[in-house]
Amino acid sequence: MIMYYNKNGDNMKVLCIGNAAFDITTPVDQYPIENSKNRVQERIECGGGPAGNAAYLLGKWGIDTYFAGVVGNDYYGNQIIKEYQEVNVNIDYLEVRDDHITPSSYIICNRINGSRTILTYRPNSLNMNVVDINIKPDIILLDGQEYEMSKKVLTDNPHAISIIDAGRDKKEVVALCYMVDYVVCSLAFSEAVSHIKIIDNDSLSKALKYLTNTFHNKVIITLEDKGCAYYENNKMIIIPTIKVKTVDSTGAGDIFHGAFVYGLTKKWPLSKILRFANIAGAMSVTRIGGRNSIFTLQEMEEVFNEFE
């Protein structure tokens, strides 16, 4: 059974650092033809960003969560703030800037095959100021967007459990991978850093071993609809996921990372954490929109216990 957060009990503090964006999703029945005009019937809006979505999930699931990042002093920024407040995420370290607009993503979601095409705008100069964090987090989740701030927080909190959502092989993300306890990475990141094309279990095992030996920590490779893989006692273990009909895969990785952190707060064994995170990510693709795809803990329990 899933253990629910008791507000009167001992609760771990989680600090999420990274990208806060605003997503505008347009579902279509087929991908638009270039140089054509198309009328759509739906427009789904919500906050986004890898660490941003994970923080929202953790707040929604009752975890004592803080988010550090930066938004503009505009409509999108205000909506992101409102969403965090609705799920009790502490935003003392969310910087609001008058000189930039909030990052935004425009997402075309093909509901026939579940694919999504994302166009993201984020000014290169938009980075939060490096400030002191006046809490002692038990767990730190990074997405690599705020490199200087992330490095400072990791240095200041050496005893915290640390995780990076490694989606892209940017040099800042790779540098942070050496500093954390868990590297939870995508297939694209794994292939780019290991220089191994993952086509079967043998190549997956080689890439996983390479990354583990390189970063000297626990590496988990997410495999989309095939689950995830990690090394235990010098042996690769694949944790499968559940089969679902994909409608929109936006935010599935972010939700996986948020659920992974949730499992850490409950001190579950890693295999259980990964089964739980797999299910959260899989369930999310059955709904349109990133944060709209975060199921309640009660809904998670029903599905999780069915496959436990």
Image: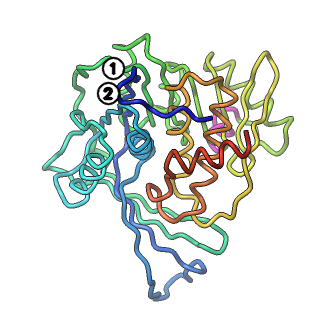
Residue 18 is situated, as x and y percent measured from the top left of the image, at 37, 38
Evaluate whether residue 254 shows in this view: no
Would you say residue 190 sits in the magenta stretch?
A: yes
**SS assignment at label 1:** helix
- The answer to whether residue 86 is left or right of residue 234 is left
Query: Could you say which quadrant of the image residue 249 lies in?
Result: bottom right
Amino acid type assigned to the residue bearing label 1 in the image: Lys
Classify the position of the N terminus by image quarter.
Answer: top right
Residue at 65 percent of width and 25 percent of height: 270
Q: Residues within 10 Å of mark 1 (few under 14, many from 20)?
A: some
Q: In 3D space, how far apart are the residues under numbered discs 1 and 2 (Cα atoms)? A: 5 Å
Query: In the figure, 246 relative to 196: above or below?
Result: below
Q: Which residue is mark 1?
A: 152
Residue 220 is situated, as x and y percent measured from the top left of the image, at 65, 31
Task: Please give the range of residues in magenta.
Answer: 188-194
Would you say residue 77 sits in the magenta stretch?
A: no
Q: Which residue is mark 2?
A: 149
Residue 71 is situated, as x and y percent measured from the top left of the image, at 25, 48
Q: Residue furthest top?
A: 159
The answer to whether the residues at label 1 and label 2 have Cβ atoms under 8 Å apart is: yes
- The answer to whether residue 271 is left or right of residue 82 is right
Amino acid type assigned to the residue bearing label 2 in the image: Met
Evaluate whether residue 6 shows in this view: yes
Classify the position of the C terminus by image quarter.
Answer: top right
Residue 291 is situated, as x and y percent measured from the top left of the image, at 44, 55
Residue at 60 percent of width and 62 percent of height: 286
